[in-house]
Image (cartoon, helix red, strand yellow):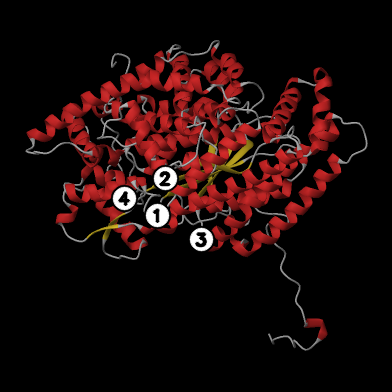
């Protein structure tokens, strides 16, 4: 083929390729065509989507006809579809497979999107039309009434009733908070990507099992140190190292790097960002008539008030701390028996706790991991969903994915398509730490039977095969519980679909799902040795069950301390001259935090709370939901069958499939017949008699 003559006017300009983010997608299940999408496609796609959405909103707000549910609320529900599609692809990639180009776009677009949505939710014309629908709400069915209630409340909480000056200031605040949250997350990722501990010698590797060394060698190859074993700040790397390394000096080095992410100084230090965020959140709350940000944030949750949250946290804190102090004495005694003459520190706790667990229960992570290969744990999660909800999972290799590690599964029931599930399981430098569920498309019936595309993102260490700790396996079940909440969603309106529920209710489906992992019915079938195929011995399963409450004082203290610090930051009524680390230290001193235990998420890297405000004043939600999940699983146990069909049907109908169709307390009562108490939670954590 000859090259075209570029002087020929017919060939002077070739037509630009269509932007794949805007073009129709002909991929299986309508998955984004990831191979065609490049960073430079996002800015023009966002521009087009924002322009289209603004035009749609203007048409709704300026409609001269009297407002109706169809023209106003349904018009709002169906607006901005292109923007939603572009944003879902973009922010999923920013979390799971980012790069400098995407990060630059994120810094630009995050505040612009915040300002865009603030303009919509403070549009007086639009709110007036929505508010007018309140008088005729009794003519709507229950789900439509719920949509009206939630939409109207969203406008009020965004500042729709403020005067023009208040609205302008609110817009400035939300835009600035979006900028700060984005920078916080990117700083944290930079700190995590930059730090490594190279284990140069055999002595550096002392005490490490083969699975830790193998994972470290793979991390070394990924980080530019081929042939070297490298520990990173991924939780799947750092925690096994702290558990097994015999080198106390290296454990300390790793622990201090892990606990000081976000406060290293320089361009990635998050302390100033935190102080500004806390101040802006307080100002935002006061604009809306609340005394503190916690009062504002919690007003739209199951908990309702900071006092209720603090009451729960402190009810659990006292027995958890008492239990942790007894655990500390046991660890100190064991260390001294081994010839250690010092005092247990934070970098020692996991190391000696693992030794004590082995001594007390004849159980250690190195012995259990061979029975928990990743593929088998995935199969266990799928089988549990099949037995509870009738779902079938079929792996698809013809579906586009955004990274070679990602696996795609079609989810069906009775021969009908339910969802597409993407599993992204391995740690890499381009992925933020942690584990989460998200969606590339949410379920709805408004535009037809739209089925969801759900993704679970993890940070497990690679291996041949990848072997999971029991905590890793629990994390997989947890996130798959969230995924089921998204996949089983069966509501009409996209704003009420899937996981779009109260923060302290959203963890119920995920934490409840964890319970099935430790059941003999599941472990007995799927916990099989990766080399021999032999099932996990029954006595090992029994020891795992017996050890479930081991070290729960420590685990509860590190979590509850984080939740109390989060709450304290957002109960502040005066944020002037705030030093986040001094404030953190003061709150920990107030509650009597044991020096040997660190918060699970210290303030400078508390992404739940400061990389956006999803869990701000809301980290307690895991514990609130745990009260629910402990009681909910008891509903199955009371039947004598943890897969009881009738109980599973109620669970699906009122919890997993129901989205936000009703108030969460009403939803739980519809499933269980009553609200729970903390008794089941304290029993589950082994704290009932610890105070």
Residue 643 position within the rendered picture, expressed as x and y whole percent measured from the top left: 47, 21
293 or 410, which lies in front?
A: 293
Instruction: State the residue in front, 229 or 488.
Output: 229
Picture quadrant of residue 637: top left
Mark 1 vs mark 2: which is more N-terminal? Answer: 1
Q: Secondary structure at mark 2?
A: helix
Q: Say left or right for 50 vs 428.
A: right
Q: Which residue matches tag 4?
A: 257
Q: Residue furthest right?
A: 65
Q: Are marks 1 and 2 in contact (CB under 8 Å)?
A: yes
Image vertical order of residue 25 relative to residue 344, above or below: below
Left or right placement of residue 688 versus residue 313 in this view: left
CA gap between label 4 and label 3 equals: 23 Å
Secondary structure of the residue carrying tag 1 is helix
Against 66, residue 34 (above or below) is below
Q: Which mark is residue 662?
A: none
Tell us which disc is closer to us: 3 or 2. Answer: 2
User: Percent x, y for residue 111?
Assistant: 63, 51
In terms of sequence position, does the residue under pointer 3 or pointer 2 come before the other?
3
Q: CA distance from mark 4 to mark 1?
A: 9 Å
Q: Residue at x 69, y 34 (%)?
A: 495
Task: State the separation of the CA atoms marked 2 and 4.
Answer: 11 Å
Q: Is residue 427 above or below residue 302?
A: below
Q: Which residue bears the numbered disc 1?
A: 191
Residue 99 got which mark? 3
Marks 1 and 3 sit apart, C-alpha to C-alpha, by 15 Å
Label located before the other in sequence (1 or 3)? 3
Circle 2 residue: 605
Foreground pick, 19 / 304: 304
| Neighbour tally class for label 2: few under 14, some 14-19, many 20 plus, Cα within 10 Å | many
Tags 4 and 3 in contact by the CB under 8 Å rule? no
């Amino acid at each position: 083929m000859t090259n075209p003559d570029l002087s020929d006017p017919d060939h002077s300009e070739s037509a630009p390729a269509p932007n794949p983010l805007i073009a129709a997608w002909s991929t299986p299940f309508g998955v984004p065509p990831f191979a065609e999408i490049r960073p430079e496609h996002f800015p023009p796609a966002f521009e087009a989507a924002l322009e289209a959405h603004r035009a749609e909103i203007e048409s709704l707000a300026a409609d001269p006809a009297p407002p109706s549910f169809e023209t106003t609320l349904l018009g709002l529900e169906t607006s901005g579809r292109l923007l939603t599609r572009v944003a879902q692809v973009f922010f999923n990639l920013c979390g799971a497979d980012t790069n400098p180009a995407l990060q630059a776009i994120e810094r630009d677009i995050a505040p612009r999107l915040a300002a865009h949505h603030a303009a919509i939710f403070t549009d007086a014309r639009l709110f007036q039309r929505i508010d007018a629908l309140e008088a005729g709400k009794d003519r709507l069915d229950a789900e439509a009434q719920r949509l009206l209630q939630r939409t109207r409340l969203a406008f009020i909480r965004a500042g729709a009733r403020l005067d023009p000056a208040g609205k302008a200031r609110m817009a400035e605040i939300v835009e600035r908070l979006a900028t700060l949250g984005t920078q916080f997350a990117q700083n944290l990722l930079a700190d995590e990507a930059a730090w490594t501990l190279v284990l140069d010698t055999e002595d550096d590797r002392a005490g490490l099992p083969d699975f830790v060394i193998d994972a470290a060698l793979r991390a070394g190859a990924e980080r530019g140190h081929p042939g070297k074993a490298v520990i990173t700040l991924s939780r799947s790397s750092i925690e096994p190292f702290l558990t097994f390394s015999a080198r106390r000096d290296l454990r300390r080095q790793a622990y201090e790097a892990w606990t000081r992410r976000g406060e290293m100084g320089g361009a990635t230090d998050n302390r100033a960002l935190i102080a500004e965020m806390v101040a802006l959140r307080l100002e935002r709350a006061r604009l809306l008539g609340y005394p503190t940000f916690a009062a504002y944030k919690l007003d739209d949750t199951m908990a309702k008030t900071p006092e209720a949250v603090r009451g729960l946290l402190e009810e659990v804190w006292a027995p958890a701390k008492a239990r942790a102090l007894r655990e500390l004495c046991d660890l100190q005694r064991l260390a001294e028996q081994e010839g250690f003459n010092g005092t247990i520190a934070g970098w020692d706790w996991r190391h000696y706790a693992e030794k004590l667990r082995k001594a007390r229960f004849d159980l250690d992570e190195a012995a259990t991991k061979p029975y928990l290969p990743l593929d088998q744990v995935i199969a266990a999660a799928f089988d549990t969903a099949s037995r509870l909800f009738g779902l079938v999972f079929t792996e698809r290799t013809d579906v586009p994915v955004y990274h070679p590690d990602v696996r795609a599964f079609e989810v069906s029931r009775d021969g009908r398509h339910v969802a597409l599930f993407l599993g992204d399981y391995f740690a890499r430098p381009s992925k933020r730490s942690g584990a989460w569920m998200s969606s590339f498309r949410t379920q709805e019936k408004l535009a037809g039977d739209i089925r969801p595309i759900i993704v679970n993102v993890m940070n497990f260490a690679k291996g041949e095969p990848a072997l999971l700790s029991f905590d890793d396996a629990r994390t997989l079940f947890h996130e798959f519980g969230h995924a089921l909440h998204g996949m089983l969603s069966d509501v009409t309106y996209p704003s009420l679909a899937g996981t779009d529920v109260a923060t302290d209710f959203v963890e119920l489906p995920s934490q409840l799902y964890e319970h099935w992992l430790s059941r003999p019915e599941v472990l007995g079938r799927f916990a099989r040795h990766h080399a021999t195929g032999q099932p996990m011995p029954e006595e090992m399963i029994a020891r795992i069950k017996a050890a479930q409450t081991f070290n729960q004082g420590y685990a509860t203290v590190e979590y509850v301390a984080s939740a109390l610090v989060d709450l304290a930051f957002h109960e502040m009524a005066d944020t002037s001259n705030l030093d986040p680390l001094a404030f953190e230290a003061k709150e920990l001193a107030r509650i009597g935090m044991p020096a040997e235990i660190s918060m699970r998420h210290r303030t400078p890297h508390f992404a739940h709370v400061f990389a956006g405000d999803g869990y701000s004043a809301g980290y307690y939600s895991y514990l609130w939901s745990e009260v629910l999940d402990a009681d909910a699983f008891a509903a199955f146990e009371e039947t004598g069958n943890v897969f009881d069909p009738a109980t599973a049907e109620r669970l699906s109908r009122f919890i997993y499939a129901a989205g936000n169709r009703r108030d969460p307390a009403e939803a739980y009562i519809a499933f269980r017949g009553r609200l729970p108490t903390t008794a089941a939670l304290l029993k589950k954590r082994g704290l009932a008699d610890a105070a």
